[in-house]
Image (spheres, rainbow, N blue to C red):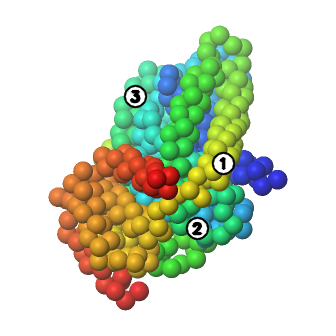
Amino acid sequence: MIWLQVALLAGVIGLDSTAFPQVMISRPIVAGALTGLLFGRPAEGVMLGALLEVFHLATLPIGAARYPEAGTANVSGVAAYMFATPALDVPALFLAGVFALAWERIAGGSVVVLRRANERLIVDAAAVADPARLIERNHLLALVLDFLRGAIVTTVGALAGAALLLAFAPFWSLPESVVRSAIAVATTTLLAAALSVFGGWQERKRIFLLGLLCGTLLSLIA
Amino acid sequence: MSEPVRSTRAAMLLRSFSVQATWNYRTLLGAGFAFVMLPVLRELYGRDRERLREAVARHSAVFNCHPYLVGVAAGAVARLEAEGADPRLIDRFKAAVRGSLGSLGDQLIWAGWRPVCALLALLLLLVGMPWWVVCGAFLIAYNAGHLAARIYAFRLGWEHGTGVAEKLRQPWVAEVQRRIATTGAFLLGVLLPLVAGGRTLALPHPVIAAAAAGLGLLVGLRFGNAVRTPVVLVLVAFVLVGLFMRWQ
């Protein structure tokens, strides 16, 4: 039953990524929390989602660009983690995050396949009696196909991820402190890299340094 | 001009939420744009099947723009169709605005509003807010901007027709863009010490971790988003090292 719920959620999140309605429940931080909620552990879901969110701050879905699909891959990663661990396990969470980062390439590839399939839904208005109705029918069909794509790719990913975690996590030997440090360094690097989205160091250094000062004070008093 | 009724314009706005459903590499957003235009085309040409077919064919041709700003083009084109404008003028208008609507939306939304809202959510998480506050704040903040952009875009297109390009060149657009970017840069600065300082992640050797994170910060600032794939590869290598060490 839980896998059916994961598949349905993934279908909705796959739709939200591009096709409808783009309210951003497909962002990793939200998708992670929603998947975690299905398993009764939303706080861990949002942690994994936050990690992936940092990786996607500077990913821009522009035009025909091919980019990894974060939302559905994050559902796969969180579902795999939830299935493989009974409670918070930082190394397993890290492994699930790395799995999701790999799986998002496959999810992104499925978007390319769907867009190629959509080419078959183009209506030659001069050749049909009622092109308006056909356009509407094909539009609904495209939505259904995208829903199914999200559901299938994510469920396969979640099952594969769970199998890998169950098989390899017990043999993974790096201590939790090292894992936490790796997460800190990786997220710091990617957060700094995201400054390029807002104009880069040259344009925004003053406000960035002001933020850095405020953040330092906040971390001291928090 | 036979002005489309309010419900027709509302139907177009609602349809614009799914404008990318049939996105493809041949006509890009073309089929989706025709889907958005259908309510007004039916209202204007419903009884004349040949004119409806001709209009549908024109609007299913190649088109692309940012999905949230498609309302600018759809609203303006609806107005032109209602005024009985020359189809060649409508095609020229669509070709003229598609590039600017794409780049404007990318700058304002994908590279502006969305990462700013995500950074706000990350900040709330790092200061210890519960998951539902984090997600709720993100969704409410983001969609306030999202819905405002869609409604404003459609209204702008409908009210100004071909003059909409001039409206989008006005200084306030660049000012909004600058303010969003400034907010984003500030939030990034606030977040970095919370992550690198070690408290949030409860690092056992915060000084060493902060030094390593400082190096990561410099690398990130220097190379921008080009570091993303190398970082992912390093993490994959990290996973493999963990497995290898156990088997040794």
Cβ atoms at labels 1 and 2 below 8 Å apart: no
What residue is disc 2 on? Answer: A89
Residue B14: image location, x then y, percent: 63, 46
Discs 3 and 1 lie in a common subunit: no
Q: Residue at x 53, y 57 (%)?
A: A172
Q: Residue at x 44, y 78 (%)?
A: B202
- Within-10-Å neighbours for mark 2: few <14, some 14–19, many 20+: some
**Front residue (pair B72, B126):** B126
- In the displayed structure, does residue B206 sit left or right of residue A167? left
Amino acid type indicated by mark 1: Ala
**Front residue (pair A125, B18):** B18
Q: Is residue B202 above or below residue B105?
A: below
Question: Which of disc 2 and disc 1 is earlier in sequence?
Answer: 2
- Where's the N terminus of chain B, which quadrant? top right
Q: Secondary structure at mark 2?
A: loop
Residue B61: image location, x then y, percent: 51, 22
Quadrant hosting residue B35: top right
- In the displayed structure, does residue B20 sit left or right of residue B110? right
Amino acid type indicated by mark 3: Ala
What residue is disc 3 on? Answer: B95
